[in-house]
Image: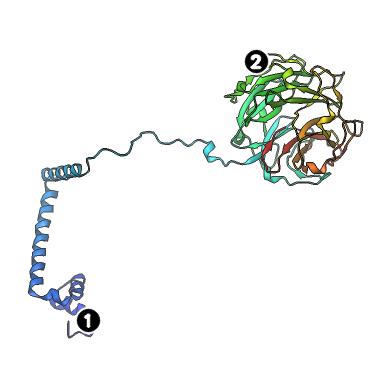
Amino acid sequence: IRGSDNAATARNSLMERLDFTEIQAQAILDMRLQRLTGLEREKLDSEMAQLIMDIERYRSILGSPIILDSVVKDELMEVRRQYSDKRRTDIENSAEEVSEEDLIPEEEIVVALSRDGYIRRMPLQDYRVQSRGGKGVKGVSTKAEDEIALLTITNTHRTLYLFTSKGRVFGIKGYILPEPKTGKGKLVGTIVTLDKDERVVAIKDSNLDGAKYVFFVTCKGTAKRLPVEELDGLTRAGRRVLTLAPDDNIARVRVTGGKDELLLTTSMGQTLRVAEEEFRPLGRQAQGVRGMKLDDGDCVVGCDVVTEGRQVFFISDFGIGKRTNYSEFTQHHRAGYGVRAMKLSDKTGKLVGAWGVADDQEIVVISGKGRMVRINTNEISSLSRTATGYKVVRLDEGDSVADVSIVRTDEEVELD
């Protein structure tokens, strides 16, 4: 070692002269000089003898199943002696289940139902705010004869209540609705079972916190107040909530707190303000009572809950609209004709409906040909109940307003 020029030469010399392996030669080079004394040599001899004994012992264990079983038993007994304290964890056989809903992102969506019965959903963020009279974003692709009937803003994880023209209601999750990039969506009759002459006339979000009743009004002016508990546990199987006359259909559905005032509006521009308490609560099978008298050819198109600090927004077939203070409408008893709410003409068309709005809210207007426009309520004129109004949304020739939904500025939902 001393005569070698470097460590590599010394290692090779040891391997050649003493027939060491490379590992053995390197181990000798790595040893400190003190380990070359006689005492250290005795320690190495003793360690070697012990290793030889261990090797023989392990070979005897591996070569005899009886000895192997005995060793395993002794070692397990030692483990039990050291760790035989009381269990600190619970062992359960069942694994946590993951539902389909857990895997679906939660997001705000727009649900649109066409007059031809096609339903689809779209992300709410796809729609930009338009100034008054803007043409908006093309949000729905429809056939010329397939006009949009309903528009609702909701959440993918919440349940939607689908109220039908024949007094039934179904419960479905928002995420089960189709979200096509183009096209009309899916026939609602393939999602819930409808009779031949039955159609969906209202879509409501199930987030009814604080509400005590669901208020129905039919096209012919019949009204009914139903406790919200009657909707608990709704599924796609559906249930009947209102018994109708053969020639009548549900027009509007609202939720109320028990002591609210309601504003009933007709297509010919009449409005009746009435206390909710004038309609006694009824069971699911009941037919309802007279809510409002109508002239021949007239029908109910609006039902709004009167809210302090808000106004009522009216819009006609051809996009003429206005805001009017609730104070312009005095309260009357149910079954009356009401008062004039908006001056109509051939240029305005009939009223589409009436909705309660506050300052700085956004109104989503959807036309029959699928045109969507978001407008801030501050851009809509506040006028008296006898005034006609101004152009709120600019429509293409042959198009008309189909529905409206109200969105708060924080993007929470205020359903129609």
Q: At which x and y percent is residue 58?
A: 13, 53
Q: Is residue 48 visible?
A: yes
Q: Quadrant of the C terminus?
A: top right
C-alpha span from label 2 to label 1: 103 Å
| Residue 107 coordinates in the image, percent (x, y) | 61, 41
| Residue pictured at 50% horizontal, 35% vertical | 99
Residue topped by disc 2: 283
Task: State the residue at coordinates (60%, 36%).
Answer: 175
SS under mark 2? loop
Amino acid carrying label 1: it is Thr
Which quadrant is home to the N terminus? bottom left
Residue 155 point in image, percent of width and height: 62, 37
Depicted 236 relative to depicted 8: above or below: above
**Closer to us: 16 or 389:** 389
Mark 1: few, some, or many residues within 10 Å (few <14, many ≥20)?
A: few
**Residue under label 1:** 9
Q: Quadrant of residue 222?
A: top right
Which of these two is toward me, 12 or 262? 262
In the image, 230: left or right of 264? left
When asked about the image quadrant of residue 302, the answer is: top right
> Is 148 on the left or on the right of 13, as rendered?
right
